[in-house]
Amino acid sequence: MNRPTLTLIATALFWAAIWWPFRRLAAAGLAPSQASLLIFGSGAVAALIASRGRLPSLLRSPALLLAALASALCNLGYNLAAIHAPVMKAVLLLYTSPLWTLPLA
């Protein structure tokens, strides 16, 4: 299988499966916004540790900081919708459509 096909499948799997841990955490009593902050915050800290010393250049780029903030808000909105909105199930089917379209194509 070629790389674009694998990338398409991996992306569809990721977006189709991301709602499950957030639903489990919500059932355990952790609010979706808190779970998002915990998960993505720990990822951000790990990325900052791995980048070693590149934080000053990140802080000098307001466009990059704005893009990071917009991305964080989009992820939070998606996670909240995945927890609370039944219509998200239909959207998840749309995200997973490459999985069942590729073998049938």
Image: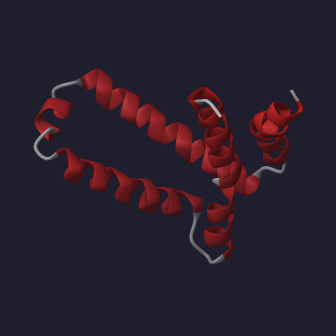
Q: Nearer the viewer, residue 103 or 57?
A: 103
Q: How many labels does the image show?
A: 0
Query: Residue 72: x percent and y percent?
Result: 46, 41
Q: In which quarter of the image is the N terminus?
A: top right
Q: Looking at the picture, does residue 7 appear above or below residue 77?
A: above
Q: Looking at the picture, does residue 35 appear above or below residue 71?
A: below
User: Is 56 situated left or right of 68 in this image?
Assistant: left
Q: Nearer the viewer, residue 83 or 47?
A: 47
The residue shown at (45%, 59%) is 39
Query: Residue 25: x percent and y percent?
Result: 61, 70
Q: Quadrant of residue 105?
A: top right
The residue shown at (78%, 50%) is 85
Can you name the residue that lies furthest to the right here?
Answer: 104
Q: Nearer the viewer, residue 52 or 90?
A: 52
The residue shown at (28%, 55%) is 45
Can you name the residue that lies furthest to the top here?
Answer: 63
Can you name the residue that lies furthest to the bottom here?
Answer: 28
User: Is 22 situated left or right of 56 in this image?
Assistant: right
The residue shown at (68%, 74%) is 27
User: Is 49 situated left or right of 92 in this image?
Assistant: left
User: Is 20 situated left or right of 67 in this image?
Assistant: right
Q: Quadrant of residue 91?
A: top right
Query: Residue 79: x percent and y percent?
Result: 62, 50
Q: Quadrant of residue 93?
A: top right
Name the image colouring: secondary structure
Can you name the residue that lies furthest to the front here?
Answer: 1
Query: Residue 50: x percent and y percent?
Result: 22, 50
